[in-house]
Image (cartoon, rainbow, N blue to C red):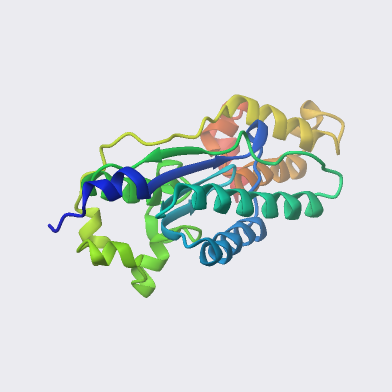
Amino acid sequence: MPRIARKNFETSFFHVLVQGINKEFIFNSNKMKKEYLKLLKKCNKENQIQIIAYCIMSNHAHLLIYVDDIKAMSKYMHEVNTNYAIFYNYINKQRVGYVFRDRYKTQAIFSQEQLGKCINYIHKNPVKAKMVKSCEQYEYSSYQDYVKTKNLAPILKEMGLNDIYQIQKIEDSEEFLEEEIDKEKILDDRIREFSKKYEGIEEIKKNKEKLTKLVKYLKEGYQIHYTDIMKKLNLTKGQMERLKR
């Protein structure tokens, strides 16, 4: 496999992780994911950034970028996140203040092997979270670009990495930046938020229609697993199956 100069890995390839403040689900709808993706693509042209891979989840996003100047990356991320924060607070009219947790996290990529592993790691995020069964089923990742349009970043082709299937052959055992998710807190917060419309969680559990709405709200709105919902609401498997119909 062709190699690229080590100095480029030391200065040009970065895995970036952005997260919602207080672990909020800042990308919790298709509209929000599409807006962030639009900003990623719009701002990369202005800042001479190559987006190699991306995956936008519900409360965080992973990016793998190539940039010649580290200052350009800072400018790019500031521009993307500032514009998204303005959009997010506008859509959520009662909300003000910060949207993203901290600045963002970065991890330098030091080898071609690590680069391939990072791409695989990013694309497998939704599978790992059990949101989908395979990478191609998730709409908001670059896997779709790689498979459907074969639109790999130019720098990858320069390195001899010509398609996603070649990249997937690289074992993905590398450790990369992880999002920190407190499932218990997310469940508590979302149930509390939903319950404000009604008499309380115990009353909701007595009403099948309301309980069905709560399960759908947690599953579809926040991608919380049915098993976690069952455990939190003390439901049997049979009860959950009836609510899912």
Residue at image x 59%, y 42%? Answer: 59
Q: Nearer the viewer, residue 245 or 7?
A: 7
Examine the rendered structure and indicate whether residue 184 appears above or below residue 43: above
40 and 187: which one is in front? Answer: 40
Camera sees residue 240: yes
Q: Position of residue 220 (x, y in %)?
A: 62, 49
Q: Where's residue 183, x and y in %?
A: 57, 29
The x, y position of residue 36, in whole percent, is 61, 57
Q: Is residue 145 above or below residue 242?
A: below
In the image, 52: left or right of 47?
Answer: left
Identified at 74% across, 55% down, the residue is 87
Circle count: 0
Residue 231 lies in quadrant: top right
As drawn, 138 above or below 208 = below
Q: Is residue 85 left or right of residue 113?
A: right
Image coordinates for residue 41, horizontal then vertical, percent: 54, 64
Residue 234 visible in the picture = no
Q: Quadrant of the N terminus?
A: bottom left
Q: 93 or 233: which is nearer to us?
A: 93
State the image quarter where residue 184 is shown: top right
